[in-house]
Structure formats: structure tokens, C-alpha cells
Image: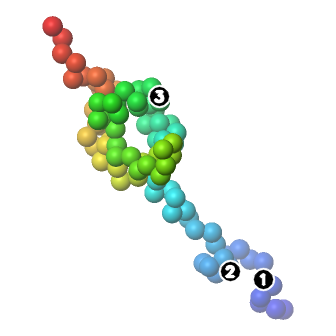
Amino acid sequence: MNSSTNSDPAAASPQDSPPAQPAQSDFLTLQDFLKEVGLSYSTYRSLRAQGRTPKEIRLSKRTIRISRAALAEWRMTNEQAISGQSSFSSSASTS
């Protein structure tokens, strides 16, 4: 019996296995970011105008990526708003 024709998946070398996560997974498209945090695009644009979005990586005029590290940092600073305990526009004063 030839061992090179062994069809046992456990016997496959690590080189034959696809990578667990592609390198691109360190970055989110804007659509993936919005889906992950539960924001609409219009809310994101409003927050961006206020300077309250994670750091964007612009690949071109219309292509934006957000790193998972920037997302984690943004979540830390916006934890209360994300959990729904307050609104994103909590800085508005009431007179």
C-alpha cells in the first residue's frame, strides 16, 4: 500500500490546509463594519461628520477599509453608545 495515496484527511500536512484566516480579514469593508456594529450608512456619515468614527484606510476615492484594531479602539471609546444605553448624539444639549 502506497502511503502517498492515503486519503485520510488527518494525515494531510499543514501545508495542504488552507489558512484559517486570510490576511484580508484584518480589515473590514465599510459594509462589513456597518453590519457588524449595526449602524446604517446615514448614521455612519453623520458620525463621520462629527469625527466619531474609527480611523478609515482609504484605498481609493470610493474604497474604504477599517482595521479590526481601529474597530476595537472605537468600540472601547463608544462602548456605552453601542450597547444602546445612550444615543450617539448624547452631546446635544437641552435648553
Vertical relation: 92 (above or below) 20: above
**Cα–Cα gap, marks 1 and 2:** 8 Å
Q: Position of residue 53 (x, y in %)?
A: 34, 38
Q: Residue at x 28, y 22 (%)?
A: 89
Tag 1 or tag 3, which sits nearer the N-term? Answer: 1
Helix, strand or loop at mark 1: loop
**Cα–Cα gap, marks 2 and 3:** 47 Å
Tag 3 or tag 2, which sits nearer the N-term? Answer: 2
In the rendered image, which quarter contains the C terminus? top left
Q: Alpha-carbon neighbours of circle 1 within 10 Å: few (<14), some, or many (≥20)?
A: few
Identify the residue at the far bottom of this view. Answer: 1
Query: Which is more toward the observer, 70 or 81?
Result: 70
Helix, strand or loop at mark 3: loop
**Mark 2 is on which residue type?**
Ala
Disc 2 target residue? 11
Q: Alpha-carbon neighbours of circle 2 within 10 Å: few (<14), some, or many (≥20)?
A: few
Is residue 5 visible from the viewing direction of this image? yes
Disc 1 target residue? 6
Q: Position of residue 71 (x, y in %)?
A: 37, 46
Determine contact: label 1, label 2, CB under 8 Å: yes
Helix, strand or loop at mark 2: helix
Q: Position of residue 5 (x, y in %)?
A: 81, 85
Disc 3 target residue? 40
